Image: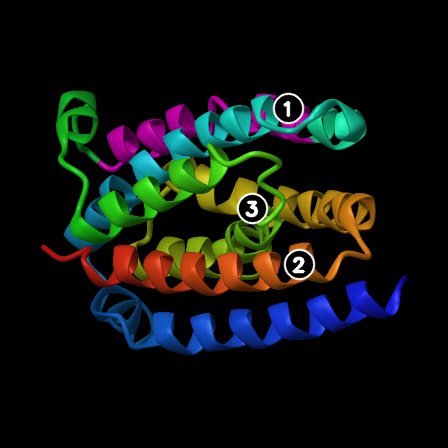
């Protein structure tokens, strides 16, 4: 691993740690950690996440289309990643229905302010030429899936005594996003060393982390 990559990973770890602390103070996740989580809270959580999950494959596809020919290997990796995730939102919807909610409700729900801002940011970045900074966003989003999703899923399941089919989305991502982070390291190696790209990756991670936290902050009942 190059010195540039090591430095980026160190900075990204700091950003991620700050995000974890911010998330712990959000109303919904604070209730979860204190054992006061209710079914309506979990349903609000799933509704709040749905559009971001659905948009994930879309902004990755757009990003891939803006990666130039000299970086075809990276383009292929991003496209494959988009394919593996483009139906994940359906699993999330199924979890919502398994809790007693209706498909019409979750599909028709309006994005909260944080989700709107996060979506706009991701599509903006994906539309840039060679949007390598999005590796920072992937670090944040896949990192949450790897580090926090299973933790959240198990806590929800225990707190609400839900059947396994109600928390499949969170548990699935807790098991699979670690593999996606391995892919991240390979992608990182394809764009480094480049100081400008390195700075953009870290900055994109910082903005994505703040907007992701805002998305969770706005999830209320």
3 or 2: mark nearer the eye: 2
The number of numbered badges drawn on the structure is 3
Left/right placement of residue 197 relative to residue 42 reads: right
Q: Within the magenta stretch, is there residue 122?
A: no
**x%, y% of residue 136?**
58, 55
1 or 3: mark nearer the eye: 3
Q: Give the main secondary structure, helix, strand or loop, of the magenta stretch.
A: helix
Q: Marks 2 and 1, how far apart in space?
A: 24 Å
What coloring was used for the rendering? Answer: rainbow
For marks 3 and 2, the one nearer the N-term is 3
**x%, y% of residue 31?**
24, 70
Of residue 79 and residue 165, the one placed in the foreground of this image is 79
Check the picture and name the quadrant holding the C terminus. bottom left
- Residue identifier under label 3: 134
**x%, y% of residue 187?**
75, 43
- Residue identifier under label 2: 196
Q: Residue furthest left?
A: 221
Give the residues in magenta: 78-99
How many neighbours does mark 1 have within 10 angstroms: few (below 14), some (14-19), or many (20 or more)? some
Q: Marks 3 and 2, how far apart in space?
A: 13 Å
**x%, y% of residue 66?**
58, 27
């Amino acid at each position: 691993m190059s010195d540039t990559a090591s430095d980026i990973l160190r900075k990204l770890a700091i950003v991620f740690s700050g995000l974890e602390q911010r998330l712990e103070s959000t109303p919904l996740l604070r209730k979860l950690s204190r054992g006061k989580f209710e079914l309506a809270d979990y349903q609000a959580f799933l509704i709040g996440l749905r559009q971001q999950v659905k948009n994930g494959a879309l902004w990755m596809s757009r990003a891939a289309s803006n990666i130039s020919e000299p970086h075809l290997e990276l383009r292929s990796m991003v496209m494959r990643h988009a394919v593996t995730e483009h139906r994940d939102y359906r699993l999330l919807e199924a979890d919502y229905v398994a809790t007693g909610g209706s498909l019409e409700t979750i599909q028709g729900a309006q994005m909260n302010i944080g989700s709107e801002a996060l979506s706009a940011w991701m599509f903006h970045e994906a539309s840039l030429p060679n949007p390598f900074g999005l590796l920072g966003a992937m670090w944040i989003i896949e990192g949450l899936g790897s580090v926090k999703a299973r933790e959240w899923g198990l806590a929800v399941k225990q707190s609400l005594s839900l059947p396994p089919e109600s928390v499949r989305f969170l548990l699935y991502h807790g098991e699979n996003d670690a593999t996606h982070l391995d892919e991240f390291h390979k992608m990182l190696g394809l764009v480094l060393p480049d100081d400008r790209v390195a700075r953009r990756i870290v900055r994109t991670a910082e903005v994505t982390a703040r907007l992701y936290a805002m998305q969770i902050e706005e999830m209320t009942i």
